[in-house]
Image (tube, grey):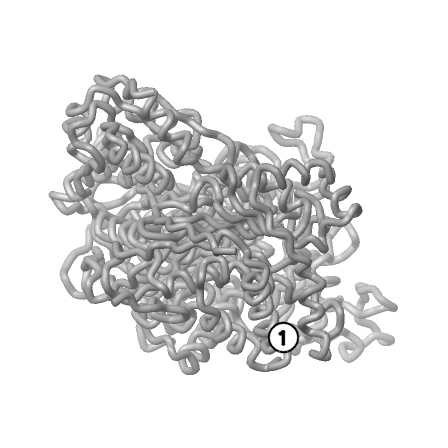
Amino acid sequence: MAKKIIEVDEVVVKFAGDSGDGMQLTGTQFSDTSALLGDDISTFPDYPAEIRAPVGTVGGVSGFQLHFGKIVDNPGDFCDVLVAMNPAALKANIRWVKDGGTIILDTDSFTDKNFAKAGFQQENLKEIYQDFNVIQAPMTTLTKETLVNSGLDNKSMVRSKNMFALGMVYCIFDRPLNYTEKFLDKKFVKKPNIAESNKKTLRSGFNYAVTIHAMPSYRVHSSNSLEKGRYRNMNGNTAAAWGLLAAAEKANLPFFLGSYPITPASEILVEISLRKDLGAKSFQAEDEIGGIVTAVGASFAGNLAATSTSGPGLALKSEAIGLAVITELPLVIVNVQRGGPSTGLPTKTEQSDLFQALYGRNGESPVPVIAASTPSNCFDYAFEAGKIALEHMTPVLLLTDGFLANGTEPWKIPSMADMPVIKHKIKPKGEGEYLPYKRDPETLAREWAIPGTEGYEHRVGGLEKMDLTGNVSYVPENHELMTKYRADKVQNLENVFPELKVEGDEDADLLVIAWGSTYGHITTAVRELNKEGCKVAHAHFNYINPLPKNTADVFGKYKKHLVCEMNLGQFAGYLDMKHPKFEYHKFNKIQGLPFTVVELKEKFKQLTGKN
Amino acid sequence: MSDNKYTFKDFKSDQEVRWCPGCGDTAVLMSVQKAMAELDHKKEDYAVISGIGCSSRFPYYMNTYGFHGIHGRAGVLASGVKTANPKLSVWQITGDGDALAIGGNHFIHEIRRNINLNILLFNNQIYGLTKGQYSPTSLFGQVTKTSPYGTVEQPFHPGELVLGAQGKFFARTIDTKVKETTDILIKADKHVGTSVVEILQNCVIYNDGAYNNITSKETRDDNQIWLEHGKPMLFGKDKQKGLIVDGMKLRVVHLSDRISEENILVHDAHEPDPSLHLALINMRVGLGFPVAFGIIRQVEAPAYDQLIEQQIEEVKSKSKIKNMDDVLNSGSTWVVE
């Protein structure tokens, strides 16, 4: 039987199983191996909020999706290959498998008991056999047979079955095993028997797939789009944490993070806590308010300070952001958005904190708002947030979301020497009189005098300040003046923010407008439509307050404007307020899930009249 | 005297003090300025941090670095300042509303962490700045604007909270006792860790005379006992009364032929076991005791900010990561040719 080989530019694979089945590790291994072969990759883990949901239930399914190939901008809508370790994993993911796609099952787990736990019928399976290419593998049995002489107990043997699955998938995609073998040697350096057993199971899975002629076999065209250089996989939370640290190093300032654990932002606190080797201080406060207020205190004391949170936490921090606004101290607030309101959908993604970021404070309280748009550029925008905060003496709000936070992609490692210079506003010792609210005439940023510096003793606080001196002032005209200064200082950032760029077909009638994490899916949708001859252009915003200076000029070149976002239309409403002369069509999704490329293309086609 | 040769005037800012005439805060301001002049820090190394309330206006009247924060958050603001820059001498100014109501959570956690700073808790048993509502330390049954028929809430006793949060330093003083307060503040600053000084402070407008049964000429000798480490716990006009332990409880005794000074308890502020300190803190006039003043508890323990600095030094000396380039290139990486 000739082996069927499918040649493709890109492919989507999903590993799904119980929370304890090791699917995250399996997916990461496949992703890392593909990266080493030069593929472009995007990954997204999908796991339950419960730490150990009941075994075998749909609620306990943990998945890891990866999309790799020539040019990849998102983790993919539908998968070509699904690995389902039990009926629950199959039930939860079957709707995400492409028509005619391949499904690999651990048939040992497809018992009556597990069907019952998943609320799935044997009958369903029959239909699936008709519609999809199903590869049945008794993975548990074969893993145990492989390890029969290993000396491991039953439980330890069964635990290796994810390596059997990985081996099979490596075979289907013709990937080498050596990266994972090296990884296992390193991970289990103190338990050589476990390392050996896992490696044996991995090879066994690979060989099993060869033996049964597991079909089809894919040949994925490697990426040639990646620039030369050293790469690593990067997720949004690590990137944000490192971007902040990089800004502190570039500005030559100590770094302080005041934070409180919250899904999906906790990893930022975790990453910073690791970096005592750089002298970074992480303060795990007793609550969200403590997180930000310690950071405001650290900023007053001369650190680059930040706080990290998600929506509900941002709500609690509102008053303290106002304190940083009126004291005009540098501060970065990273808000990793999740589904809301209230506790909402903690592990799911959404862009619904935009209005909260822009307006969620008492008084006239302007704050620059910027948003990352890919997992790895969370690094750049966190760095940028630190730079703006330090150079303009203001709190800065950085928006990411659960999709960016947990998603990964290959990232060309930058060199610190190439990062932009950051010039903080600290007044050097011995330069005469210090006036806390004397401003740079251009940026309106005040100078920063650090406690411990002789002669610059001064007081700041939440009460309105007199221009120049910073003394408490109730003078009516002064309040208006200071309010305008604070507003203008933020608005003036449009002079330093980069101009809005357009991707896709510049002659298009339709301009797709979006911000934040929708970038990858929209980019793919626009590129594919352009290829198909459909004229669509895409303007993506990373700078939200203030908007880029050329926003209206760009919008003016197009007849139709469609704003796509994962909320009920907050950015569209904001644009309508700032640039009311355009009519904004809206495309919104509020399901805790990213847009799919398919639904985006459909919508774009509809608006271009090509449907 | 320190080498700095400051006087209290060096710590006065050019701002007009706007507390009500007769307010106890004015005397405390004087005590703080005197203490700072005597301590060894440079003027620029002081940071005075507050929350919201009458007493929280304090930083504006000090010619030091200062930060007037938001309601309830003095503790975390001060914690951030001290952790970020441990060289500073940080003084947190807070009231019974700021520290024990809206900021209660921060207050106990700050003490638990044992951050090396001084908390001056101005306790006037009332909300002054909002014009006379009851506070978490107002007495049970106290009639205020928001308790016209008397409160039905039991008050917090700050010292009890401090000990419950594993506090290592607790002192109590009276606003008008400038000499004693200055002395306590100096010792509080020298103590490594969180030092809480409760200041019984009279609000002349909304709760005038709240402490009359302790501070008036007629009552003060019998109703105040000033504790000093290593000294017997004596009080009364001619120091003829003292404290002894009777079973598990404290008891007031009169010196006589049968009870001499040797029978009287000797104050040990350094005892790690907090039981007796708690009993001393909880003595109240209504229960037949004098109120305890002075440094009631002072126990050595490592401070949070010191431990952080130590940890940083240790990790730095062991880690191969020296800068951000090292971080960026750490772990699994690959080269695209």
Give the amino acid type for the residue marked by disc 1 in the picture: Ser
Q: Which residue is mark 1?
A: A197
Vertical comparison of A383 with A576: above or below: below
Mark 1: give few (<14), some (14-19) or many (20+) Cα within 10 Å: many
For the point 44% across and 33% down, which residue is it?
A: A352
Side of A481 where B98 appears, left or right? right
Between B7 and B77, the one lying in front of the other is B77
Q: Position of residue A410 (x, y in %)?
A: 35, 58
Which chain contains the residue that carries disc 1?
Answer: A
Quadrant showing the C terminus of chain A: top left
For the point 37% across and 65% down, which residue is it?
A: A36
Q: Secondary structure at mark 1?
A: helix
Vertical comparison of A273 with B22: above or below: below
For the point 38% across and 26% down, which residue is it?
A: A602
Between B238 and A241, the one lying in front of the other is A241
Count up the numbered dots.
1
Side of B93 where A302 appears, left or right? left
For the point 32% across and 24% down, which residue is it?
A: A605
Q: Quadrant of residue B141?
A: top right
Q: Position of residue A276 (x, y in %)?
A: 43, 70
Q: Can residue A403 be spotted in the picture?
A: yes
Side of A348 where A369 appears, left or right? left
Vertical comparison of A470 with B303: above or below: above
Q: Position of residue B205 (x, y in %)?
A: 52, 36
Q: Position of residue A445 (x, y in %)?
A: 20, 46
Between B161 and A545, the one lying in front of the other is A545
Q: Quadrant of residue A565?
A: top left
